[in-house]
Image (cartoon, rainbow, N blue to C red):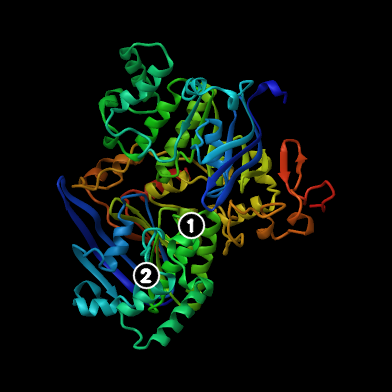
């Protein structure tokens, strides 16, 4: 098993709002091994994108550490951080708004190379742009096209090409296929898997779509309202979800084979506000197993089996109940 | 099934849009029927013509760019395409209503939700304002929102609650047909489950027929009785849900099934349909799917494929299935 490439410890990001402090991420811990894909899932507003951005310091974390090969990224000077960003890149969700509409493909892909002063000479830069385009499956004839002339799939390939142009080791993929049609989505997912194999990349794959996350990830972390509630390898989480929220989330996914589903859990109500959240378990208001202790004491994420983590006081009692 | 039991019968519907880049053939000779109380899943990618078909049924195709060039839309025995604008106005909302994808933009931000539901009731029923408001509050309860919230504005509700309000408006006059255009696409999965569950219950209670436009085969599997798969302006496969899922028979349908990561499957790599949906201003001749089809042959690029019934009620528009074509 490879070493952790990235370690996140007690990461918090709070935003000040008129109504009070918004706890977007409230103490998140996980590690990503070199060459693996960690899937980060959760619903809107759970803090998954903020986590991805805080790791890259696109949002400055409020507290906590982000260790990249043992070095704390949050303490780097601006100059050292800029150098670090060549190793840590991000692909954004929306290929419609994340590309400058006034730049042609060649310029879009060359931009990160120029910002990072990778090549001193134009011909080398042009060579790299052509190589990256080939790598992500963009036809060479598109080099002078503008984003509006291309479909969503090709635009997302540009986004990937921009991230990969500077040869990073680690890439945050923030909902990279959510804006795309299913057929294009499949093409991009297969491309990213192929690139990971070829280039030995490490991914943090952020998505609200559990089916997609299952397809690409080695391990999966489930987030709810600023905290990770469960983390484990991609199989166990689907075979035997431990946290009541994970169970509800899995049962809510429409599947083409509904007859195979054991139980459909329909959660009541909505996700509560992350502004000044109440103490105790964040999920307890919607949890069908809640007890007194849940509202009083916040459950910590703890290891309950080989590589399996869950933040629930009573996960084992739930297991017994099912067994009976 | 006899003709008379059909609530909606679309025959040869053709809709085109005039654009600077040429004429867009959005819907080409589409046939589709729906029985009372039935839910039909209408599946396809962006630009396949699903929404245009729905808008044509409602006579809401944006003019003058868009034009319904031909066909019939028989609803309760009468052709909607022959109705006057005035007649259509009274049909919309009372007999056929529509739920749009984005609840954030389909509600009026400066009116309370109670007023918005009451507005629909007031338009179609001869009731006083007070009675309409009372009925609106009852509708809110029906969709699971407390009646005292009828004085609140849309921004005070979450996304899932807003979509419930939109559903309340759509069902306020107890329509025979509801067309729901991607009603849960903008919602999170747990909220989607709530809303789909609600729609199922209400449909059973009021015996409403529904056309559910979606790109999610899972939603079809869980909510619909029948499914129609649309590609480049026409339906390529139409069947009972069970028959379609047991035996997807058009190469495009098969491709669609292969390209969706399913939570129940362990496939390592997704089967990808190569290429892109065709440019609707320049559809390929013959079968519009042939340039991307792994099983295309000579005839596919020259002749339009026939509609073949491969088992009772299961139609496929492809040469692979009979009428001089190859065996499966």
Q: Helix, strand, or loop for circle 1?
A: helix
Query: Which residue bears the numbered disc 1?
Result: A212
In this orientation, which residue lies closer to the viewer: B282 or B287?
B282
Residue B293: image x %, image y %? Answer: 68, 58
Residue at the image position 30 percent from the left and 61 percent from the top: A51
In this orientation, which residue lies closer to the viewer: A236 or A150?
A150
Q: CA distance from mark 2 to mark 1?
A: 19 Å
Badge 2 vs badge 1, beta-carbon distance below 8 Å: no
In this orientation, which residue lies closer to the viewer: A103 or A251?
A103
Chain letter of the residue beneath label 2 in the structure image: A
Query: Which residue bears the numbered disc 2?
Result: A32
The answer to whether one can see residue B240 in this image is yes
Question: What label does residue B16 carry, if any?
Answer: none
Residue B10: image x %, image y %? Answer: 64, 31
**With A277 as the anchor, is A150 left or right in this view?**
right
Residue at the image position 21 percent from the left and 79 percent from the top: A79
2 or 1: mark nearer the eye: 1
Q: Helix, strand, or loop for circle 2?
A: strand
Chain letter of the residue beneath label 1 in the structure image: A
**With A186 as the anchor, is A55 left or right in this view?**
left
Neighbours of disc 2 within 10 Å: few (<14), some (14-19), many (20+)? many
């Amino acid at each position: 098993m490879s070493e952790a490439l990235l370690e996140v410890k007690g990461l918090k990001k709070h935003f000040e709002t008129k109504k009070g402090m918004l706890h977007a991420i409230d103490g998140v811990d996980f590690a990503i091994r070199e060459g693996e894909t960690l899937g980060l899932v959760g619903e809107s507003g759970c803090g998954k994108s903020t986590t991805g951005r805080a790791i890259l310091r696109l949002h400055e974390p409020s507290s906590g550490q982000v260790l990249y090969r043992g070095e704390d990224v949050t303490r780097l000077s601006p100059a050292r951080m800029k150098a670090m960003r060549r190793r840590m890149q991000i692909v954004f969700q929306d290929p419609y708004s994340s590309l400058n509409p006034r730049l042609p493909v060649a310029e879009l892909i060359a931009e990160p190379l120029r910002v990072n002063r990778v090549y001193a000479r134009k011909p080398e830069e042009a060579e790299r742009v052509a190589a990256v385009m080939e790598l992500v499956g963009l036809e060479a004839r598109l080099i002078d096209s503008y984003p509006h002339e291309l479909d969503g799939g090709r635009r997302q390939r540009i986004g990937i090409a921009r991230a990969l142009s500077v040869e990073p080791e680690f890439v945050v993929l923030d909902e990279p296929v959510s804006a795309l049609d299913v057929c294009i989505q499949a093409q991009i997912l297969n491309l990213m898997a192929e690139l990971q194999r070829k280039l030995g990349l490490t991914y943090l794959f952020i998505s609200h779509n559990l089916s997609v996350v299952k397809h690409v990830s080695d391990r999966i972390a489930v987030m709810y309202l600023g905290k990770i509630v469960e983390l484990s390898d991609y199989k166990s989480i689907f075979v035997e979800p431990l946290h009541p929220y994970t169970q509800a989330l899995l049962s809510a996914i429409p599947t083409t084979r509904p007859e195979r589903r054991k139980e459909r859990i329909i959660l009541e109500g909505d996700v509560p506000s992350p502004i000044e959240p109440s103490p105790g378990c964040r999920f307890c208001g919607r949890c069908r197993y809640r007890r007194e202790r849940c509202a009083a004491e916040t459950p910590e994420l703890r290891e309950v089996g080989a590589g399996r983590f869950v933040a629930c006081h009573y996960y084992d009692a739930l297991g017994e109940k099912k067994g009976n | 099934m006899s003709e008379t039991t059909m609530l909606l019968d679309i025959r040869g519907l053709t809709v085109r849009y005039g654009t600077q880049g040429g004429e867009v053939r959005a819907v080409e000779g589409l046939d589709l029927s729906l029985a009372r109380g039935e839910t039909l899943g209408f599946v396809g990618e962006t630009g396949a013509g699903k929404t245009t078909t729905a808008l044509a049924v409602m006579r809401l195709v944006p003019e003058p760019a868009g034009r319904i060039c031909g066909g019939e839309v028989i609803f309760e025995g009468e052709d909607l395409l022959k109705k006057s604008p005035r007649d259509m106005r009274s049909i919309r909302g009372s007999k056929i209503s529509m739920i749009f994808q984005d609840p954030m933009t389909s509600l009026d931000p400066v009116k309370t939700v109670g007023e918005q539901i009451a507005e629909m009731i007031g338009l179609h029923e001869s009731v006083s304002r007070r009675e309409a408001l009372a009925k609106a509050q009852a509708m809110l309860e029906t969709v699971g929102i407390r009646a005292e919230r009828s004085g609140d504005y849309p921004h005070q509700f979450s996304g899932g609650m807003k979509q419930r309000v939109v559903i309340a408006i759509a069902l306020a006059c107890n329509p025979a047909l509801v067309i729901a255009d991607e009603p849960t696409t903008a919602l999170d999965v747990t909220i989607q489950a709530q809303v789909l569950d609600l729609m199922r219950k209400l449909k059973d209670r009021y015996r409403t027929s529904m056309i559910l436009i979606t790109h999610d085969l899972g939603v079809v599997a869980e909510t619909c009785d029948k499914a129609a798969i649309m590609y480049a302006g026409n339906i390529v496969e139409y069947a009972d849900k069970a028959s379609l899922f047991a035996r997807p028979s058009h190469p495009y349908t098969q491709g669609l099934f292969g390209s969706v990561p399913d939570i129940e499957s362990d496939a390592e790599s997704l089967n990808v349909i190569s290429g892109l949906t065709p440019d609707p201003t320049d559809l390929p001749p013959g079968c519009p799917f042939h340039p991307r089809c792994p099983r295309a042959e000579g005839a596919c690029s020259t002749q339009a494929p026939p509609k073949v019934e491969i088992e009772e009620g299961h139609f496929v528009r492809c040469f692979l299935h009979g009428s001089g074509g190859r065996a499966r």
